[in-house]
Image (cartoon, grey):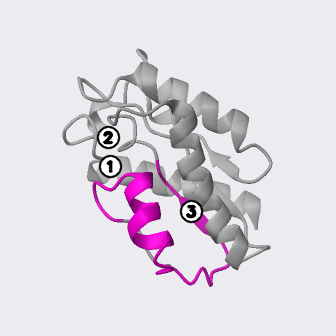
Amino acid sequence: MRNCGIAGISSFAYDRCILREERLSCVADIFVVMHGTNDIVMDVSADEIVSSIQRSIDYIRGRNAFAPILFILCLHTNGRMDRSNRKVDRLNAALLENLQGITDFVHTDLMDDDFGDLQKDYTVDGLHLSEEGYCVLQSVLERKIGQTV
């Protein structure tokens, strides 16, 4: 397993700094992609974010035609003024609509509380996952990978 993420980076910056520079070889049996949370704070539309994320998917697919690509839908936040859950929901809906059939989605709503916010135990600051949150996400991913391969 290889983590090619960069903390705090948007999908736009990832495209500019990583993909356009062809810094990923994409030699893997399965890919897990997580983008979007850092994009919704930018002054761009959901469609622009989807297009940016699509470039990541296209980059992978262009270098590895057959490996499954799992996309983790954006997690909700808890108490964050900078990342509204309504924006998260709009982006997730746009991703589901536009990336259907080219990626397999990993749903994260089971990490929500009764109010639709990220459960407090799963976050250290309302955005970033706690150790317990990562354990839950790992379990979700392992289950999804087991269903995929």
- At 45% from the left edge and 29% from the top edge, which residue is drawn? 88
Disc 2 to disc 3, C-alpha distance: 20 Å
Looking at the image, is mark 2 or mark 3 earlier in the sequence? 3
Q: Specify few, some or many for label 1: CA neighbours under 10 Å numbering under 14, 14-19, or 20 or more.
A: few
Residue on which disc 2 sits: 122
> Residue 125 occupies which quadrant of the picture?
top left
Q: Nearer the viewer, residue 33 or 112?
A: 33
* Mark 3 nearby-residue class (10 Å; few <14, some 14–19, many ≥20): some
Look at the image and tell me in which quarter the C terminus lies: bottom right
Mark 2 nearby-residue class (10 Å; few <14, some 14–19, many ≥20): many
How far is the residue under mark 1 from the one under mark 2?
Answer: 6 Å
- Residue drawn at x 39%, y 42% is 39
Task: Give the amino acid at mark 1.
Answer: Glu
The reply to whether residue 143 is visible in this rendering is no
Q: Is residue 18 visible?
A: yes
Q: Which residue is mark 3?
A: 32
Q: Earlier in the sequence, mark 1 or mark 3?
A: 3
Q: What is the magenta range?
A: 6-35
